[in-house]
Amino acid sequence: MNTLSWDEILTIDRDEVQLPYFDPLTDLPLIIIVGLTGVGKTTALTQLDKLGVEFTLLPNRRVLADEVIISSLQKEAGETPHPVTDRVKRFDYTARYRAKYPGGMAFALSRLALNPLKTSGWLVFDGLRGLEEVQQATWLFKQIRFVLLDAPDTVRLTRLLQRHDAFDRTEAAPSALNADLTAALYDIPHIKSVFTTRQIQQIGLLGHTVSPADIIKKVKIIVQERQNYNSNTARIYLTNTLPSRRLLVVNTADQPAGAVAKKIAGWLEV
């Protein structure tokens, strides 16, 4: 796996002509990984690399959000660009950018250019989410293919609680520290639109073995992400729009990461 750094990428205006040695990303063959937090995107790519599949990984969604989306909105607000680590606040920034530029992250991705001589194998971006992003990507990129990874929200929550990624941070309500965990869960806005009553009660029982504050934080991330991105409509749009050669859908809860990677590897050769 070859990984491009942000220093090897150029950000171009939509009307800018081709630059010497650099090609607009919209003109290049591109594999887009689609999926919400915890579906196993990073794990699948790691396993794909272990299989010996040659690919070049673009700077990921986090980097693109920092360097293009969040920084541009901060500058427009007269602020000095600064890091935003709270994931719920980052969702707010990406939602505002999407309201300003149709497709949001897909639009930001379309503004990139790179030197093809710096790449090898498949060109991969991790990743897009939701209907608006994938829809815009199919319009903006001439040679695009999608790998859509999915998993139930309860499975994604379990993975978030286990992976201990420093990126998965947000503020927890004080009630999560001082009151009944189940009651604190019900205080999270929109939680009932994501988890059933029974699931919320089962999550509440996790407080016996997992930090209640950590549970609240991870549940808030999943709920807020669902409010911003609808993976079901994205899957329906892609399956109704693209032939199987351009779309692979995998439920990562059904099989180990190695099997997911083998499916991706086989599909890439079609």
Image (tube, rainbow, N blue to C red):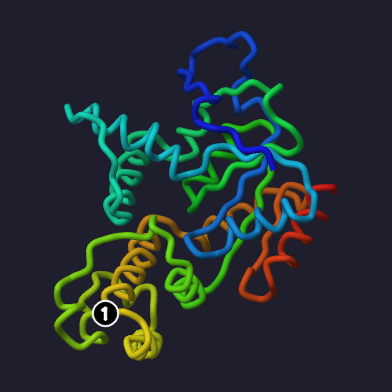
**Which residue occupies 35% across, 71% down?**
219
Q: Quadrant of residue 18?
A: top right
**Secondary structure category for the residue under label 1:** helix
Residue 117: x and y, percent? 71, 22
Is 33 rendered above or below residue 182? above
Q: How many marks?
A: 1
Query: Which of the two residues, 220 or 195, is positioned nearer the viewer here?
Result: 220
Residue 247: x and y, percent? 70, 52
Residue 11: x and y, percent? 47, 22
Query: Which of the two residues, 205 or 267, is positioned nearer the viewer here?
Result: 205
Query: Which of the two residues, 9 or 72, is positioned nearer the viewer here?
Result: 9
Q: Quadrant of residue 113?
A: top right
Residue 244: x and y, percent? 76, 53
**Which residue occupies 37% across, 87% down?**
209
Label 1: how many Cα within 10 Å (few below 14, some 14–19, many 20+): many
**Which residue occupies 32% across, 60% down?**
169
Name the residue tied to disc 1: 185
